[in-house]
Each structure stands twice: as structure tokens, then as C-alpha cells.
Image (spheres, rainbow, N blue to C red):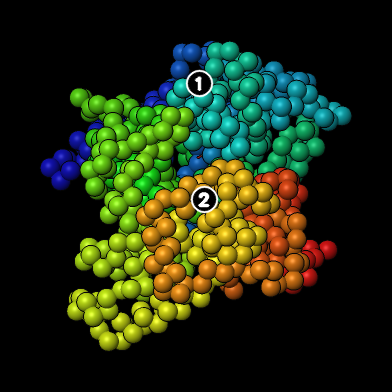
Amino acid sequence: MSSQSPAERADELRRLIEHHNVRYHQLDEPEISDAEYDALVRELAALEETNPELQTPDSPTQQVGAVPSALFAPVQHRARMMSLDNATSFEELLAWGKRMERFISGDVDYVCELKIDGVAISLLYEDGRYVRAATRGDGSVGEDVTDNIATIAAIPERLAVADAPAVLEVRGEVYMPMPAFEALNRKQVETGERLFANPRNSAAGSLRQKDPKITAGRELSFWTYQIGELVGGPAFTRHRDTLQWLAEAGFPINPELRVLDTLDEVHAFCRHWEEHRHDLDYEIDGVVVKVDDLAQRGELGSTSKAPRWAIAYKFPPEERTTKLLAIDVSIGRTGQATPFARMEPVFVGGSTVGVATLHNEDQVRLKDVRPGDTVIVRKAGDVIPEVVGPVLSLRPDGTEPWRFPQACPVCGTELVRQEGASATFCMNVECPAQTRGRIEHFASRGAMDIEGLGERTVGLFVDEGLLRDPGDIYSLDFERVRQLEGFGDISVRKLQDAIEASKSRPLGNLLVGLSIPHLGFTSSIVLARALGHLDRIMTATADEIAEVEGIGPTIAQSVCEFFATEQNRAVIEKLRDARVNFEGPAAPTEPQTLAGMSVVVTGTLEGFSREGAEEAIVRRGGKSPGSVSKKTTAVVVGESPGAAKLTKAEELGVPVLDEAAFVRLLETGELPQ
Ligand code: IVH
């Protein structure tokens, strides 16, 4: 870039921005993330500011959106649909606020609204009747999407006011709620069609349909945020009153709106929603802060592109593009071969992401990501990073669809995918990757909880030939361990103590630690409690196991097969020789306060690990499944809870408990009134 003159760079930036405008606004197939696009516009604006001779009236910094596509009839907006200036840090937001307060005579009230990540739409009502809808287009001319918008249930056909104004032009955002977006993508999978990258793209794609019936099937919704023009209606002095009136007229107004009178409060509002954006069932990408008083807005006026009386505080991006370097396969403790993406590290959603799981063979095929592709990476809230898909227009020539390897990358054994299943397995139980995974899991907190036997140490011991299966832990050669780098008398003693202590863990923990396919934490405890002894479980038939309440036939079959395998029985004998506890509580030791209840835990609690909380529930006769359903008695919520669980709980009216209420529930079995 240093070899370019400012004029050349400005030229290049203009061409790039125009290219991305068309991809975003007309094709609904952006090649770069919003944050990357904003960075280009900012760079151009900065160049133009320091080199005023480079400013041109047709520069993208002076324009809004893109020229409308020829697919739809053009609509001339009666009043220009402007864009908003962005602030990407609190400093910028506060600097804007301070400018407002200096410029305006009198106090400023700020209306803070969520910035909905959808598609801007203008709706026209004449004499109270819906007559037309248009996209923003380039701000002056948009596209006529009247018939498509008419299919959205949230948009009134007639205004619910006594004296309908002669003309009302309303603006707002069409969006697709998360559940509808997820359902749509599931359907796209079933029909083998292209996945939508995010709810905004799917909302835009759903509006750009020639056939309104397709739009009608897409569950779109709408939030109103502004009046564009009003002829023959009430006179307003404050923005909040216009929204109130619009709500009475039948338009949906977002309930999270707040009127605040200090920049500190505005700052707190932005921080709150940055942290809680995933508690909503629609996507937001920031907060819009607006001056409330309409006369003050008049004083402030607008630039050619955006009003001075509003600013969009944009959250840090959750989607970025990066290069996909390779697709590798990892082997888990059950032998499952999971493909994952290795990418050029990219900072997204608050952390640097260099790898992301691709789940299984079908997912890779569906997304059709190929090494060399530019891919969109998404990391939202506490959700694990995800490769959304490739940017097809940037695919280099000569790439081939990725093929699942035929052999295990660790031991070379043939990989097997059973018919009708999506997972692929390495069938060699002695595969070093599986061995490491099984031992690590056996020693982990939710199982035998052996402090000091984590991923690194297990890897080292396996490589040194000290451990081949979990049973070897109890005859570990400590003399050899002492000679390994990083071990001394103290660490060896600690490890010995931790291993000794693990021998008395309850049977449920032992079952968890054995890595029996399909047998999770809750079912391990249920089985331990019902059958009481490992020998009893080992000799039971699949039918007998399936009779235990809460254990289905798949688990029962899997348990039987596990204990019928010679290698597994050999491990059990090593554990028996070491006098590891095989007995479960014959009768429940805790009062069965939660008998018949189903309690879901989400987020981090202070006094319990996740496993500890689930164990406490199960010990008291309850169940603790991983998802919320109609049958859920309560959802316990800690720090950074999963948004999906919370939303589901709200939808179904399931009580939500904090940690204190959870402790009371454990003790008494009673929900708070
Ligand atoms: S007010 C003069 N309020 O963000 C501009 N816009 O980046 C008036 N948006 O074009 C816009 N939520 O599509 C406003 N609560 C909100 C919004 C919002 C989303 C969109 C809108 C606008 C874009 C600007």
C-alpha cells in the first residue's frame, strides 16, 4: 500500500466498495463481513478528509446503499432514506454525545434503540391503507416490494387510528427471527439447497422473491423505528411520542427502547446489550442512539449521507472472513473421526479463532468448503466457533471438493462410516488417539477426577508407554515417572495421592469414566443407582438394563456390547485388582426432593461445577437433561447462560432460577412462588 499514492488508494477503495455494495445490496451474497466493509469505508473517508481534493460527489462515502436492481420496479422515495454514522468504540460514541451536548442549547434526552440486523424498508399508507413498500436502494430510489411485504403478519394493512392521516411513510427493519432462520436452514439441508449465512441474508433473500408466496412461507417480522413523512396527522415534538403513536396505529415497536438522559446511562445500555445480544430471539448488531427532541434534531441537521442527531454504536463483529488452510480430521476417545478447519487466525466474537469443527462428512459436503477458500467464520456468544460457508466468488481456480480420508490419520486403520449414520469411526480400539482420549476422560473432573492427570501428562505417559488404558493408571510406574522431565518428588506424591483418592469415587463416576458409547452422565448415575454394583451391570442382559427407568434400548445395547468386549473386561479386572470402588449407593443417600422433576442447568454457577450441579439433581431423584422442553420443571441460570435455553424457557413458561433458588429447590423440592 505504501507504494500507492493517496489518489490511487482512494480510487482502489472506491472500486472495492462499489463491488461490495452490489454483492451486499443486490445479490445478497456479501464477500466480506460488515466490519471489513466498514473498515474500507472508514479508510476512504479518512483519505478524503486529509486530502480534500480527492473528494468526489459520487464517492461511496457520500452515498447510501447501492443502485436498486432491475428485478423490481423502482420507487422514488418521497424523503431520502439516509444511513447512520457508526461508532465502533465507546470513545467514539461519547465523543459524538459530547458534540451533541456542546452544540445543542438545553438538555439532551437520548432514545436508545436496538440496531436490528435486517433489511431497511419504507412503508407507505394513504388514508390509512397500506399502498406500497420499498427497499432503501441508494437512498433516493428503492425497489418496489409491495406484494412481498404484504405477506408479513406484523405489518398492518390498515392503521388502527380514528383519523387516518392522508399520507404516512413509516420506516423500519424487516428481520427473520432466529428460530425461523434455523428452521429455514434445516429445510434447505433437507432439500439440498444452499444454506443462508445469517438471518439478515435470509431476510433479504426472502424479500427478493418474484413470487410473494415464497416470501409468505418465510416467517419474516418487522420492527418500526421512524416516521419518514406524515401529512395530515398529529404534530409531534419528541421521537418517543412518534413511536408511541405508531404503536397505537398497529406497528410493532421494539420493547427494549429506553429514553436516557446521561451519556453514562447510554454507555451502560450499550454495554448491557453487547453482553446480552444473544438473549434475544432476533439478531442485533449494535445500538442506535438518537436525540429525542425533534426541534433539536432540526438544529443539528444532516450531512449528505446521515443525520447528525443519531449514531449507530456497532458491536464488535461476530463474523469475519479468513483463509481456510486445511481440513484435518481428529480422532476422539470413542474413535469418532471429526473433520475440522484450520484457518488463518482471525479475531472474531471476542477471541482469536484458528480452528473450528466441521462436525462430520455431510456437513463438509453441504457447506462445500475447500482448502484455499475464503470462508466466513462466526463466533457468537458462548457458542463454539463455526465455519458458516465459503465465499464462492473468491474461490481460487482448480479447487476440488474435500474428500473424507479413508484411513485414520493417527494409526492408519481404515475409517468406517456405518450406513444411515453421519459419523465416521476409526475402529482400532488401540489407536493412540483413542487411548489418550479415553484415559484423559477417565481422569477428568466429571469422572474419576484425578488431579494432575490432564491432557499433557496423559499424552506424555502414553507416548512413554506408561499407560495403555485407564486400568494402567492404578499400576503406574512412579519410579519411571520421577525420571521424566517436569516431575519431582512433590509432584509424584501429589499424583499418587490423587490416584489413590479416585479409587473411592461413586460407581456413577466410574461408569462415566469408562467412555461407554451413548452412556452420558445422567444415565450413568441412574444405572449405578438402579443396579448398585458394576458386576451386576456387567452381567445384566440388554433387556434387563432397558427396564431401568430413564435408560433406552440404544444405551442398554451399548452397555452390553461394551462389557462383552474382551479389552474392556481386561480394563475392569485391572480396576478390580486395584480395589477401585464398584459399588453404587444401594438406596439413595439424599432425600429425594426432586423425584419426577427435570431441571436444566445453563451457565456457570458459583458453588457448583456443571457436573456437580447435575449430580446434585440426579442424587435427589431428578433428571438433568441438556435441553429445555415442555417437561422441564425449571431452568437454573448461572453466569453467561446459553441463549437458546433461556429463550426456550421463556417461550414455554418454564420457571428460571438463580443459584440461591436452585439451592432451595435441592433442599426442599419447592419452586419459588
Ligand atoms: S434509524 C436516518 N433505528 O441501520 C437513519 N436504524 O446503519 C434512520 N437500523 O438504515 C435509521 N435498527 O436499516 C434506525 N432502531 C433503528 C435501527 C436502524 C436497524 C438500520 C437501518 C439503517 C441502518 C443504518
Disc 1 target residue: 191
Q: Position of residue 246 (x, y in %)?
A: 74, 36
Disc 2 target residue: 559
Compared across the picture, whether 115 is left or right of 318 comes to right
User: What residue is rendered at 33% in x and 43% in y?
Assistant: 426
Q: Amino acid at mark 1?
A: Thr
User: What residue is rendered at 85% in x and 28% in y?
Assistant: 163
Indicate yes or no: mark 1 CB to ligand 1 under 8 Å: no
Looking at the image, is 357 positioned above or below residue 455?
Answer: above
Compared across the picture, whether 594 is left or right of 28 comes to right
Please give the label number shown on residue 84: none
Looking at the image, is 479 positioned above or below residue 285?
Answer: below
Q: Residues within 10 Å of mark 2 (few under 14, many from 20)?
A: many
Q: Amino acid at mark 2?
A: Val
Nearest to the observer: residue 289 or residue 118:
118
Please state, as top left, top right, bottom left or bottom right, where the N terminus lies in the image: top left
Q: CA distance from mark 1 to mark 2?
A: 36 Å
Looking at the image, is 39 positioned above or below residue 143?
Answer: below
User: What residue is rendered at 71% in x and 51% in y?
Assistant: 632
Q: Is residue 332 visible?
A: yes
Nearest to the observer: residue 383 or residue 405:
405
Q: Residues within 10 Å of mark 1 (few under 14, many from 20)?
A: few
Q: Image quadrant of ligand 1?
A: top right
Looking at the image, is 375 positioned above or below residue 89?
Answer: above
| Quarter where residue 212 is shown | top right
User: What residue is rendered at 41% in x and 33% in y?
Assistant: 418
| Quarter where residue 231 is shown | top right
Q: Position of residue 642 (x, y in %)?
A: 57, 53
Q: Is residue 114 visible?
A: no
